[in-house]
Image (cartoon, helix red, strand yellow):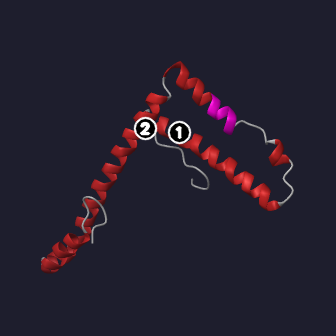
Amino acid sequence: MNLGADFNLDDLMQNALGGGWDGIENAGKTAALVNKEETRKLREEERRQAAIIAKVFSGKAGRAALQLLVDKTLLRSASLEERNAKTAEHRAMLAERREGQRDVVFMILDMLRVHKGEDPKPTGGEA
């Protein structure tokens, strides 16, 4: 069973069970090393993607585009359609659409923070 490009559960089990008690006792260490390597690769990919976003939004035009996105999503007032929604379902659908739009802008802002070397801000209910 292969769970990732560099993580193979069969190899982990073989190392753990094939090595007798020593293999079983060291299975946790082996898994921790694999997890550490996967985490490193994920962070590397996150930094690569953040560099792309930083390049797109650098310069005068990029900053203007980012300001436009913030204005049209995070800072905008409720639309006429949102204010006039007749049912709870329609109101909820519009709220979900708006939340999705905002999430994209928050993701871009987080990627810009990552590019600067900062940690991304927690979103939603996370603390």
Q: In which quarter of the image is residue 28?
A: bottom left
Secondary structure beneath dot 1 equals helix
Relative vertical location of residue 11 with respect to residue 108 in this rendering, above or below: below
Relative vertical location of residue 12 with respect to residue 109 in this rendering, above or below: below
Query: Percent x, y for residue 56?
Result: 47, 29
Task: Give me the residue at 79% from left, 42% from top.
Answer: 78
Q: Is residue 75 left or right of residue 64?
A: right
Task: Give me the residue at 81% from left, 61% from top.
Answer: 88
Query: Percent x, y for residue 109?
Result: 54, 37
What is the crowding at mark 2: few (fewer than 14 residues within 10 Å), some, or many (at least 20)? many
Residue 8 makes an appearance in the image: yes
Residue identifier under label 2 = 50
Question: In this view, which residue lies farthest toward the top?
Answer: 60
Residue identifier under label 1 = 108
Q: Is residue 3 left or right of residue 51?
A: left
The span picked out in magenta is 68-74
Mostly what secondary structure, the magenta segment?
helix
Q: Is residue 71 magenta?
A: yes
Query: Percent x, y for residue 4?
Result: 30, 61
Q: In this view, does 119 lie to the left or right of 43?
A: right
Secondary structure beneath dot 2 equals helix
Type of the residue with mark 2:
Ala
Task: Give me the residue at 84% from left, 60% from top.
Answer: 87
Near-viewer residue (80 or 114): 80
Task: Give me the residue at 73% from left, 52% from top.
Answer: 95
Q: Quadrant of residue 89?
A: bottom right
Type of the residue with mark 1:
Ile
Work out how far the residue at label 2 is from the one at label 1, CA to CA, in angstroms. Answer: 8 Å
Near-viewer residue (62 or 21): 62
Relative vertical location of residue 11 with respect to residue 5 in this rendering, above or below: below
